[in-house]
Image (tube, grey):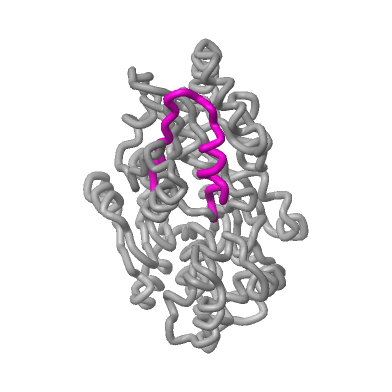
Amino acid sequence: MNVLHITPHLGGGVGRVLLAWLRKDKSSTHTVFCLDYANKKAIEASRETGFRLYGNTHVWPPMINNYIEKADIVLIHWWNHPLLYDFLIRRSLPPARVVMWSHVSGFYPPNVFTDALLKYPDIFVFTTPMSENTLEAKRASGDLRVIWSTAGTDHVKDVRPKPHKGFIVGYIGTVDYCKMHPDFLKMSMSVKVPGVHFIVCGGPNDEQMREEAERLGVGDKFTFTGPVDDIAPYLSEFDVFGYPLNPMHYGTCDQSLAEAMAAGVPPVTLGNPMERYMVDAHGYVVEEENYAAAIELLHLNPFLRRDLSGYLREAAAQRFSLDAMIEQWQHVFEDLMKKPKSERKWSGRVSGEGVSPSEVFIESLGDHVDDFRANLKGTPSFNWKSKTRGTAHQYSSFSPQDKILREWSDSMEVA
C-alpha cells in the first residue's frame, strides 16, 4: 500500500514514534509531508531508510493534492496546529481514504476534539483509551479506534545503571509549563535527600528554567541539558525518573515515560489520567503533596528500586511494543482499503478559502471557546500561555497579518 502521512512537523515524541515505525515497516510504501519543518534527525532517517520526506509543504497545495490522489491511504497525524487546521478547514481534498491519529488526549483546550474533526476521516484513531471518555468521543457516530503510540523500547532495553556520585532524579521531555507541573522546581527543591541532583533533558524553555532556578538560589542542584539526541547515557545515571506534569497537560502515550520504564528507572508521577494508565502498578503515582516523600522512600530503599527495575523492564517490553503497534495499523489499513475514496470538506461552523486565521483558531476549539474567553479576560493558565501547542500565540505567529489574533496574543502573557 502507498501511505501518505501528513503531519504538522516531524520532531519530538511524535517524530520518534513515526520514524521508528517507518524504519521497521516494509509492508507499505510511506511518504511523509510535513506542513511545517522536518528536523535534522528526520531528514537523516529519511536518507537512511529510503522513505520520501518533504518539509514546508503548506506552500505547495497543488503538490499535496497530487500526492493525495495517488495515495492508497492518507494518514493525518493530528494535534492542534495552525497549519494543520488551515489545511483541514480552508481546503477541500480530492477523493481519498483518510484516517486520523490523535497525538493528544483531547481533554484540555486548546488541544481538544470537535464534532467536525471526529467526523472528517473514515477512521479516527486515539492513542489511548482515555480519549474515549471525552464528550466529543461519546457522542460521535463514526469509526473510532485506539492504537497505543510507541517508538518501541529496543533502543533502551540494554541500559544498565552506571556508578555516579550522589542521587540523581531525571526528567526527559518537553520543558514547558504547559506540559511540566508549574511548580516543578519547587516540588523538586522539597526533596530532602543528601547529594540529590536534578537533570532536566529537553526544550524549548530550558534556558528560562535555568534562570528561574538561579533566581531561586538552587542553580547548583539542577542541570539543564537542552534537547539531547541520545537519552541512553542519561537514563543509565538516573536513580529515579521524576515526572510531575501539569494536571491539564495534553499528553497521551508519553514516549519519555515509556523509555524510562523500559530502561528500568522507577518513575514517580502525579495522579493524572495518562500517568495512572501508563505506570499502573509499576511505579509511584502520588498526590502532589507526596511527591517528595516518594522520591525519598526510593532513595532509602535501593533494593526496592532494583526490584521495581526488573518489573518495569518486563512490563514496558509488552506494553510499548512497536511490532504490536505496526500490526494494529496494518489491520486499519486493510479495513480502509475496502472503502471507496471520497472527497473531503470540513463540516464545522466555517469552511472554505475565505475563512480568516482567527476564525480557524476559534473553529479549532469547538465547544471549548468559552474556556479561551475566560482565560482571555482573566489570568491565563499555562495551557494558553505557551508559544506553541495550539494557542493564540502560535496561531498569531503563523498569521501576523490577522489583527484579531495579534490582539488576543498580546493580551495574554507568554510563558
Residue 366 appears anywhere in the view: no
Is 270 located above or below residue 76 in the figure? above
Can you tell which quarter of the image residue 155 is in?
A: top left
Q: In this view, does 209 lie to the left or right of 277?
A: left
Comparing 312 with 248, the one in front is 248
Residue 139 % position (x, y): 77, 59
Residue 394 % position (x, y): 47, 70
Is 48 located above or below residue 52 in the figure? above
Is 392 located above or below residue 186 in the figure? below
Q: Which residue is drawn at 56% across and 73% down?
A: 412
Q: Residue at x 34, y 73 (%)?
A: 63
Q: Is residue 243 left or right of residue 131?
A: left
Residue 224 % position (x, y): 36, 44
Specify the segment rendered in magenta.
178-202
Residue 59 % position (x, y): 34, 76
Is 21 located above or below residue 31 in the figure? above
